[in-house]
Image (spheres, grey):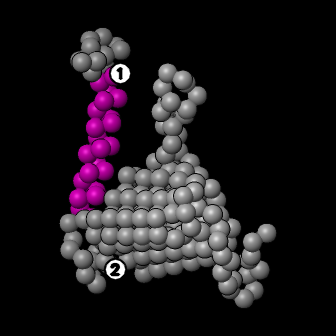
Amino acid sequence: MEVLEYGVQGKLKFKQFLRTELVYAQRSFWNAVVNVFPDGLLTNRYLRPLAMHVSGVSSGKGCRVWKTVYITRPSNLSLGQGVLINRHVYIDSYDKVEIGNNVSIGYRAVLITSTHETESPSRRAGEIQGKPIVVEDGCWIGAGAIIGPGVRLSRGCVVSAGSVVMRSMPPNVLVVGNPARVIQELKAEQGTGASIP
């Protein structure tokens, strides 16, 4: 086993191994604490968001988080006011994830910020890279939708259930499919001037 090598190189590998294990232990502990509370008005609206805030998630007032939400790096997650995160949501926050005000994230949705370098033909899943995700105010991400690395969902965007979004979307549109594409413009709030260019 490489971790048990002796000398300077072995010590460096062992320190790196310990650091990695500490990150995994911290992540597992945090997710266990947040998900130990049963679902209910008090836990979803107050206790679970408070536990998330204590662990490093930046969150606004009125957030509701259901049980069995998994977040890889809580300190990289920022939630606006009135956010709803439903059951079994997975947020890979290897890079920053910014979720605006009044956003709803449906059951089993997945937000993924990490990807890999693909330059080397001998190993296509190379070094991990992070690309931030931004979900602007008023968006709704449907059940089972996947939001990929580097995506920005503009204000008022609706992602249909099961859709796979791998590129940024304009404001106030309904997107559907794999890969997701715009199928309908939605009514914009008065005075925002937001529409498809």
Residue, disc 2: 45
User: Does the magenta portion include 1?
Assistant: no
Residue, disc 1: 12
Outermost residue, bottom side: 190
How far from the left and from the top, in percent, is residue 156? 61, 76
How far from the left and from the top, in percent, is residue 4? 23, 18
Give the magenta part as a residue range. Answer: 13-34
Q: Separation of disc 2 and disc 1 at Cα?
A: 44 Å
Asked if residue 20 is positioned above or below residue 111 in the image, the reply reads: above
Asked if residue 195 is positioned above or below residue 16 in the image, the reply reads: below
Q: Residue at x 55, y 32 (%)?
A: 118
How far from the left and from the top, in percent, is residue 1? 24, 18
**Residue nearer the viewer, 186 or 183:** 183
Identify which amino acid the numbered label 2 is placed on: Arg
User: Does the magenta portion include 24?
Assistant: yes
Name the secondary structure under disc 2: helix
Q: Residue at x 42, y 81 (%)?
A: 62
Of the residues under marks 2 and 1, which one precedes in the sequence?
1
Identify which amino acid the numbered label 1 is placed on: Leu
